[in-house]
Image (cartoon, rainbow, N blue to C red):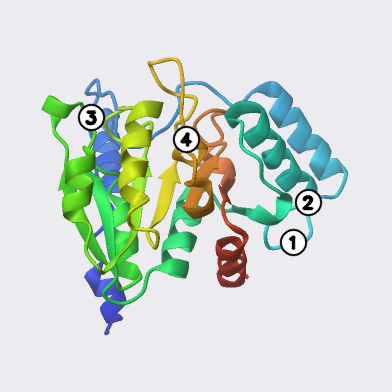
């Protein structure tokens, strides 16, 4: 039985392998703290569960619009304005089955064969595999504990080539928890301004789970919103991992491309 070359290029998820091993050890009675999957240690708030129950009663059970219900996209627009000071329209929002699909949609939409995607390390294991799925080339830039797991502008500049198509930024970081400050993002943005064709994927799913008390988005930096795709969702902040609700906020041409792919 032959599998596609595309699938054979992919490696099994290290996250799921670790989670399975953790479950096996727990079943043996071993006291284990599972740090593999980003699963909050609290439950979905009661108000959200009540709203979902009402939605079922109100028959929200048919096909929804591909990019998400208009009222949901407007709620995301309102959140981005209220919490992040960013102005979007519903046409710049697309909802997917979790932030994971959101990331994959964007990579599949903008990355082609031979395109390079810069990924700071340590990184979430799925990033590299998604790039490979899109026939792109992951370019790994290591950032160790000596630099608080955050890459420098010099490292970013050195990694950029004529084939660089995108840069994946995860802040707060999975798996390190490192958070880029506004000034650090500003310094990275100065590099990007010299390379206008590079798209920044800003994975902000852990926005509300950090230990510095504040979160900055690179989309807030002058000149960056027009080339940044914010990826976020409700899994972490609201303990809704199984609900599979993620979204992107992006330039409309990228949203239209992801909408076409998702459709």
Looking at the rendered image, the quarter that the N terminus falls into is bottom left
| Nearer-N-terminus badge (4/1) | 1
Q: Position of residue 49 (x, y in %)?
A: 70, 30
| Nearer-N-terminus badge (4/3) | 3
Kindly state the secondary structure of the residue where label 1 is placed: loop
For label 3, the residue is 28
Q: Nearer the viewer, mark 4 or mark 1?
A: 4
| Nearer-N-terminus badge (2/4) | 2
Residue at x 30%, y 27% (from the top left corner): 178
Between the residue at mark 1 and the residue at mark 3, the CA separation in whole angstroms equals: 46 Å
Q: Position of residue 164 (x, y in %)?
A: 28, 63
| Nearer-N-terminus badge (2/3) | 3
Q: Position of residue 29 (x, y in %)?
A: 24, 24
Q: Position of residue 191 (x, y in %)?
A: 30, 47
Image quadrant in which you'd find residue 116: bottom left
Image vertical order of residue 42 relative to residue 175, above or below: above
Residue 122 appears in the picture as rendered: no
Kindly state the secondary structure of the residue where label 2 is placed: helix
Image quadrant in which you'd find residue 62: bottom right
Image vertical order of residue 140 relative to residue 203, above or below: below
For label 1, the residue is 65
For label 2, the residue is 70
Left or right placement of residue 123 versus residue 169 in this view: left
For label 4, the residue is 217
Between the residue at mark 4 and the residue at mark 3, the CA separation in whole angstroms equals: 43 Å
In front of the other: 238 or 112? 112
Left or right placement of residue 105 versus residue 87 in this view: left
| Nearer-N-terminus badge (2/1) | 1
Residue 222 appears in the picture as rendered: yes
Mark 1: few, some, or many residues within 10 Å (few <14, many ≥20)? few
Between the residue at mark 2 and the residue at mark 3, the CA separation in whole angstroms equals: 48 Å
Looking at the rendered image, the quarter that the C terminus falls into is bottom right
């Amino acid at each position: 039985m032959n599998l596609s070359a595309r699938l054979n290029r992919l490696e099994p998820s290290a996250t799921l392998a670790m989670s399975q091993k953790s479950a096996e050890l727990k079943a043996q009675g071993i006291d284990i703290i599972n740090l593999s999957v980003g699963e909050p240690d609290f439950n979905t708030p009661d108000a959200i569960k009540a709203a979902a129950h009402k939605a079922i009663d109100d028959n929200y059970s048919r096909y929804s619009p591909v990019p998400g219900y208009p009222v949901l996209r407007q709620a995301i627009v309102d959140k981005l304005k209220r919490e992040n000071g960013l102005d979007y329209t519903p046409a710049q929002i697309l909802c997917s089955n979790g932030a994971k699909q959101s990331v994959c949609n964007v990579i599949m939409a903008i990355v082609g064969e031979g395109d390079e995607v810069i990924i700071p390390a340590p990184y979430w294991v799925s990033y590299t595999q998604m790039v490979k799925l899109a026939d792109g080339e992951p370019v790994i830039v290591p950032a160790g504990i000596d630099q608080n797991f955050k890459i420098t502008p010099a490292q970013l500049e050195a990694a950029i080539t004529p084939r660089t198509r995108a840069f994946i930024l995860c802040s707060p970081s999975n798996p390190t928890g490192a958070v880029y400050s506004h000034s650090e993002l500003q310094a990275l943005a100065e590099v990007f301004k010299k390379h206008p064709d590079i798209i920044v994927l800003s994975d902000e799913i852990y926005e509300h789970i950090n230990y510095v008390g504040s979160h900055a988005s690179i989309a807030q930096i002058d000149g960056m919103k027009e080339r940044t795709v914010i990826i976020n969702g409700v899994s972490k902040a609201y303990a809704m991992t199984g609900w599979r609700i993620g979204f992107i906020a992006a330039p409309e041409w990228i949203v239209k491309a992801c909408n076409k792919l998702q459709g």
